[in-house]
Amino acid sequence: MKKAFAFLISDWQRCLMVMFAGIFLLQLVDWLAKEKNVWLPETVLAVKFTILAVFIIEIIPRLHWTLRGLLQLLSVMAVTHYVLETKGINPHLPLSAYFSSEWLDNLVQLTPYLWFALGTWVVYLVTLWWIEAKWRIYTLLVASILAIAIRDSFSTIFLWPEAAVILFCGLFMLIICHFRQLKRKDPSAYDYLSEYPGSIALPVILLVSFTVLIGSLMPEINPLLTDPYTAWRNMRGQPASFTTGKGIEVVMQTGDSSSGYSRNDQSLGGGFSYDYTPVMTVETDHRSYWRGETRSQYNGKGWEASDAEKRAAVQGVRADTALPGDPKQAGSQLKTIELKQLVTLQTDQVYPVLFGSLSILKLQDVDGSKNGMDRFLWTAANGELRFNEQSKQPYPKTYTLISEMPIVDEEGLRKVPMDTPNRNELSEYLQLPERLPERVKTLAAEITKDADNPYDKAKKIEEYLRYTYPYTNKPDLSKGRSRDFVDRFLFEIKEGYCDYYSTSMAIMLRSLGIPARWVKGYASGMLPPDQTDMMSGYDPGMIDPDAGGVYTVRNSDAHSWVEVYFSGWGWIPFEPTSGFVMPRAVPTSSEALDLSTLPALPAAEEVSMMPDTGHFVSYGIIAVVIAALLYIGLRFEWLQLLQEKLKQRRALLLKQKVIVECEKLLRICRRKGYNRMEHETMREAMQRWSKQSKWMKNDLEYVLSTFEKAKYSKAEVTEQDWQNTVKSVQHLRSQL
């Protein structure tokens, strides 16, 4: 055993150089693995095993270079075969199959993964040749750290651990290279040191290790000067951020980003300022959310595309032709309504998808034409209508979509069992990070302990998030300590915007075994002011909150929500964000229409038709019965009930009068320069006016309290309330 060990370390400098070169290359592989849509996990695994196999064969001493190369070539092939067979990509084949008459056909099955493995082998050998000289090591070290630093700064990828390991390997390679040169130039001095290796090895190891350890433990502070990267992000209206050593992205309060559709969701959080720039108008016959993309891979900081999403099948699109449905929706009991949307872009920005209601059925036309459909790709699994920028065609200015909006049947969904039969197909929507704090799972279980089906559990989590955590576009990030984004929101920051709510709901559901995915796009937007002003003067119960119209969608409407999968039904959207309301799909079948229209039509027909003379006796009997009922009603004081109804009717009229009086006050204030902002509620506007002109405070507070009582409360509005409201409005009008 001792002889074998001595034989192995006879050229310890080379063994260490090979080892540190391999560790160095592994850091570059980890970098590529973190990049989006660059390498598949199977490729990363094959490359890492290749580095390990080449290292083991490379440190075997006294092998002829031809034999060493042959062994490494065979090991690369074996590693690639093993990875692909383990991952289920290739069928099981014995290694002897590569030495049979069909060896060429079997080798083809290893491509393209084999090319990456062979390329890694060549890069490893070139790296070993390159690090023979100190100046080459310095060049490699500086270039690598500089590239990693730039990529880490100008992206959300966290690469500082890789940079630290590369620096560690580089320092040791420089030391080993120094001893190699010493051995060649002064053999006697080297022989003396080799007799007492501990006298030099121990101080070197301690010095390098101590330096790296101190660097990793240094406290993290904000930069004192504005660096070019921060200035560049501020110029683009993005948050000036840096990433901590714990992998938490911190947004500096000196430069909040503006609201809008996000392109990179790998690191969520921070704050933003509202940008009310119009993005598009959507002419539709029903309010909806305008869905963009979905994400299913949660990395502890945000969302990224999963392996299945990266390999999702895409299909071409034809004008006015039904798009294939999601295979997971096959045999669904879900009922839908057909929804048409005419989308008109108000900006020249290019988006990765076309926005539309869940779920898109067909693309009717683009820019008023049936041509140019080859620039779009359909992914049925994600329900995304992607725009192919490589087609060299412009992003459309207008397009018309037909969607099938789901009707939520709560009673039917409550019958869905907890055990999902096709869990393997839905594994990407059940994914959780390895380091998800246990208290997140505990909270989800505690909230839903009284629910016995997936739908009620989802509703309980949705309501808990909506009513527990306040909405703000600038959460206090200083409260956050946890590495996990969801854990920080639920237990530390306890406030936030849509990304906080939606991500938390998706992860909490997954912890319960309920498939969920994260969706981003735009909220409904707003109808034109003239239409909303007209609607505001009427009883709220008479207004359809999901009415159709031409909705203006702005950057401030950028939003995220959750879709939950129910076996036998498919994907159902949920809205956990406080202050937001998910659009409701109402059935438009003939049966539903008959219920609302049939009672009125026969009465109109009967009034317009003269009865036959043969029916006079029947009408006489009916008249006698009515008279008798009236007498009994008066006799048993039913008149009081009628009076109560009339009183309620009068109270309803008084409520409408108060609302109309408040609308009159808004018009008066608008003419006098007191404008109600588009995003403000009545309370927010009047509170702002009270701070602006304190003499108005008492009258405005009374008008506001009466208005809220009339519009939102079940309490009755008295005649005195209405008269006092009129007096307050008249007083404000005279003083303005």
Image: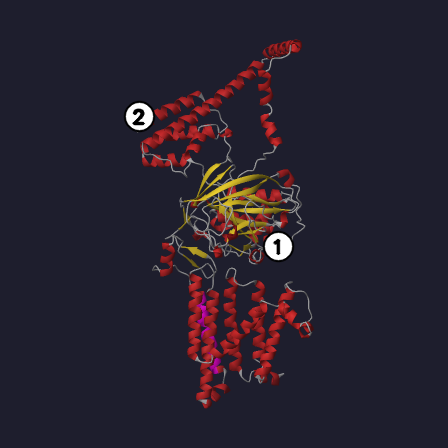
- Residue 209 visible in this rendered orientation of the protein: no
User: Is 401 in front, or is 463?
Assistant: 401
For the C terminus, give its image quadrant.
Answer: top left
Q: Which residues are magenta?
A: 199-216
For the N terminus, give its image quadrant.
Answer: bottom right
- Residue 463 visible in this rendered orientation of the protein: yes
Q: Give the Cα distance between marks 1 and 2.
A: 67 Å
Label ID, residue 543: none
Q: Residues within 10 Å of mark 2 (few under 14, many from 20)?
A: few
Of badges 1 and 2, nearer the viewer stands: 1
Query: Majority secondary structure of the magenta segment?
Result: helix
Q: Is residue 185 left or right of residue 78?
A: left
User: Is 53 in front, or is 281?
Assistant: 281
Q: Return the residue at label 1.
A: 427
Q: Return the residue at label 2.
A: 734
Q: Position of residue 208 (x, y in %)?
A: 45, 74
